[in-house]
Structures are given as structure tokens and as C-alpha cells.
Amino acid sequence: MLCGHALKTTLSPGTYDVSITHERFINGLTYPGVRVVAGQTTHLGEAKLGSFFYLIIGINDYPDEANDLHYAVADADLLESTLWGTNGYAGKVVKLTDQQATKAGILNAIAAIGDEMSPDGQDYFVMTFSGHGASDGEPSPDPGDPPYECLVASDGQAIYDYELRQCVAHYIPASPVTGTRYCTFIFDSCRSGGMFKGVGGASSSGAASTADGSKSFRSGLSRMARNLSDAGYVVITACDDTEVSYESSDLQNGVFTEFFCEGLANGVADSNEDGLISAYEALSYAAPRVQEYVSAEFGPGAVQTPQLFASPDALRDVPIYRVQ
């Protein structure tokens, strides 16, 4: 029996490799060379206990029909079935699609999830977004240095990078000791047909064209990733902020989401074969496949480079998926 960081057991004295299989353990699942001494409590050291809380967002339908997307809701479905459905870690999920994913709906969902999380900061918050991304130079009042990148909600309203950061910092519990809150953001931001022209003068970042009108492309949000830089944050973006992020009618998903989930669900992204897949392992699997697919499908001039930002950098190795 595990009690805190100590092990109470009826094992005979000796040395053992101890594996923790409780679904709520995020780190520290294996302890090699544990010495069991008769009449003494065996201490294992640190083991982070916590569950994952997922907010998964996908938006196809926008106020202007010309800006509707093809596969953002399909991305949300795939991310839900992978990150939550087949993940060996315990977790709860809230999924918002289309009219559910207004600005108020998204911010209220973050608040509600925060209320359910452990107040001691042991749980992980994971937010995925598939939908339009945009940038705006001068929101008012000015909270920092422009330009500001934003997620575009289904009602056409912007959730700016600083607003998202403030909302998460306010509602997602942090460790009372270190002040760290563990959050992973996965942005596969989309735009269809060329330019998003809503959101009070916002304009999409990047530009591209495709020969196949049934295939659209998505703008990058890596500047938003850099602005989400609080301790404990990992941010994964489908492309750099000077690139576009493609979706494919052949895959029926965004290219990045397709290969990101493929690496998790099949366990093939587990490069060190320890049964756990970190954010960095997931990205390392997806990135070259995204680049190869985009170049082959959209021409040699098409470039898409998935990105990862972590604060501190060591968090890139924190597991986000447990292979069953």
C-alpha cells in the first residue's frame, strides 16, 4: 500500500523494482532498486499525484459563412478520443464545439474546470484549440507590447493571449509552495480560404494558397505561445508564426492534429519505450511527418514547422500520455 511517499508492504526484506500503477500517478511510476527492511517503512521519494483536466475546443462555424472551417470539430473529436479516451492517465474532459465555444463559453469553462481541480496544484490542465487564429496590433486598454495574438471564438470575439494567460492564472490552481501550475496548451489554429476579417480589425498571420480549394490552411500562434510563459506551462503549436497550418480533405483533419494523435494512440511516439509519452516525444514524432506530408500534398514551397515552448525547458519531458 502506498501512503504519501512511503510504501507499506508485506514483501520479504530485499531489493525490488517498484512500479506504481495507480492511474492518478503522473510522474515517478517506476522506482528501481528499492530496499525493503523488516520493521521499517520504505520511502520512495517524490511521486507527483494528479489527474488531467481537459478543455477541448473545435470550431467550424463562424458568424461569416465564408470563414467557416472544414475539420476543426473533427480535430476536437480526435483529440478527445486520444488524449482522454485512450490515455492511461485518469482525467475528465469538457469539449466545446461551434456555438458552445463562444468567448464567454470558453472562459467560463476554464473557471469551472479550475473549481474541480485539486487546490494544491497537483492536477494538470490541458487545453486544445482548433479554430481561427488572428493578430491585432492595438487592443484597448493596452496591457503590454503589441502585436497580440488571439484565438477566435465561435461568436467572432477574440480571446487575446494576455486574456487567456490572466484567466488561467486566476482559475487554475497553483502549488501553494512553488506557485507553479501545470498547464499544457495545444494550438492547431485554422483559417479557411485566405483571411479572417472579423474581430475588430484583426488580420490573420501568414499567407498561403492551395491548388485544391477543398483544403484550407491555418495560421500560426507561436507568439501566443511565447506569451504563455508562466512556470509549469508547455505550449505546442502546429506551426511557426510565419507559417500556415494545413488541414486536409484526405485526412479529414488538420495535418498536425492527425499526426500528433497518431503518435499517442499507437504508442509509436514513445521513443524511449518507458510506457509514457512526453510533450517533446509527441512533437518529435509529429513534426517530421507533418513537414513531409505538407510538402508532398501542397507542393515544395509549403512549409509547416510544429513548435514547442516550455517553462522551464525541462517540462518538455513531463509525460502527457500513458500507453495502455
Image (cartoon, rainbow, N blue to C red):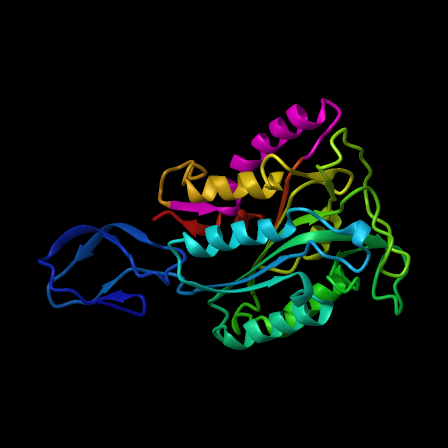
Closer to us: 52 or 317: 52
Q: Position of residue 269 (x, y in %)?
A: 45, 38
Overall secondary structure of the magenta section: helix
> Viewed as shown, does residue 298 lie left or right of 145?
left
Name the residue: 54% across, 38% down. 259
> Viewed as shown, does residue 126 lie left or right of 16?
right
Name the residue: 88% across, 63% down. 139
Q: Quadrant of residue 160?
A: bottom right
Residue that lies at the very extreme toward the left in this rendered image: 12
Residue 312 visible here: no
Q: Quadrant of residue 141?
A: bottom right
Name the residue: 50% across, 72% down. 117
Q: How many marks?
A: 0
Closer to us: 236 or 15: 236
Question: Is 298 contained in the magenta span?
Answer: yes
> Viewed as shown, does residue 141 lie left or right of 172?
right
Magenta span of residues: 276-304
Name the residue: 14% across, 60% down. 37
Residue 24 visible here: yes
- Relative to 277, residue 272 above or below: above
Question: Is 51 contained in the magenta span?
Answer: no
- Relative to 292, residue 17 above or below: below
Closer to us: 251 or 124: 251
Closer to us: 227 or 320: 320
Quadrant placement of the N terminus: bottom left
Q: Position of residue 288 (x, y in %)?
A: 58, 30
Q: Position of residue 213 (x, y in %)?
A: 76, 35
> Viewed as shown, does residue 58 lie left or right of 11?
right
Q: Position of residue 266 (x, y in %)?
A: 41, 40
- Relative to 111, residue 136 above or below: above
